[in-house]
Image (tube, grey):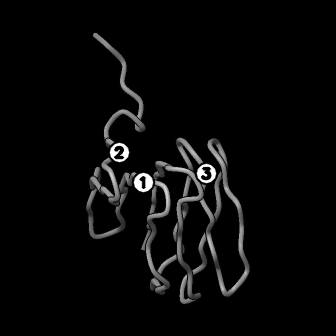
Amino acid sequence: MEKKCFADLVSYQKNSVVSKEIIKKGTGTITLFSFDKGQGLSEHTAPFDAFVYILDGEAEVTIAAARHRVVSGGMIIMPAHQAHSLRALKRFKMLLVLIK
């Protein structure tokens, strides 16, 4: 049986952001994303802390106006109720974990 890693479960698409929900429960979600270069998620807030693990590529994560460059193998926590956004400096894939 061939082993698959999280990065293999979501594909890049030209000029797009792709998401694939892995787990959705009342206590939280786990979602995979892929971002083509230049794509992103606009500034927003969430009612829960969000853990992001970069599986591939390079992202700029902005939290409360502070910019963070996060590369493959890196992680960051976006605190609840703080404005944040993401942008692909290079195309990237991430695992997003929200726990309520």
Label 1 to label 2, Cα distance in Å? 6 Å
User: Which residue is labeled 1 in the image?
Assistant: 36
Which residue is drawn at the image coordinates 33% and 51% (left, top)?
14
Label 1 to label 3, Cα distance in Å? 11 Å
Of callouts 1 and 2, which one flags the residue occurring earlier in the amino acid sequence? 2
Which residue is drawn at the image coordinates 63% and 65% (left, top)?
60
| In this picture, residue 95 sits left or right of residue 90 | left
Q: Which mark is residue 12?
A: 2
Q: Which mark is residue 4?
A: none
Q: Is residue 22 depicted above or below 11 in this figure? A: below
Q: Which mark is residue 58?
A: 3
Residue type marked 2:
Tyr
Residue type marked 3:
Glu
Q: Position of residue 40 (x, y in %)?
A: 45, 68
Q: Dividing the image into 4 quarters, which one contains the C terminus? A: bottom left
Q: Position of residue 18 (x, y in %)?
A: 30, 56
| In this picture, residue 97 sits left or right of residue 29 | right
Of callouts 1 and 3, which one flags the residue occurring earlier in the amino acid sequence? 1
Marks 1 and 2 in Cβ contact (< 8 Å): yes
Marks 2 and 3 in Cβ contact (< 8 Å): no
SS for callout 2: loop
SS for callout 3: strand
Q: Position of residue 57 (x, y in %)?
A: 57, 45
Of callouts 2 and 3, which one flags the residue occurring earlier in the amino acid sequence? 2
Label 2 to label 3, Cα distance in Å? 14 Å
* Residue sitting nearer the eye, 15 or 60: 15
Which residue is drawn at the image coordinates 36% and 33% (left, top)?
8
Q: Position of residue 37 (x, y in %)?
A: 48, 55
Dot 1 alpha-carbon crowd within 10 angstroms: few under 14, some 14 to 19, many 20 or more: many
Dot 2 alpha-carbon crowd within 10 angstroms: few under 14, some 14 to 19, many 20 or more: some
Which residue is drawn at the image coordinates 35% and 56% (left, top)?
31
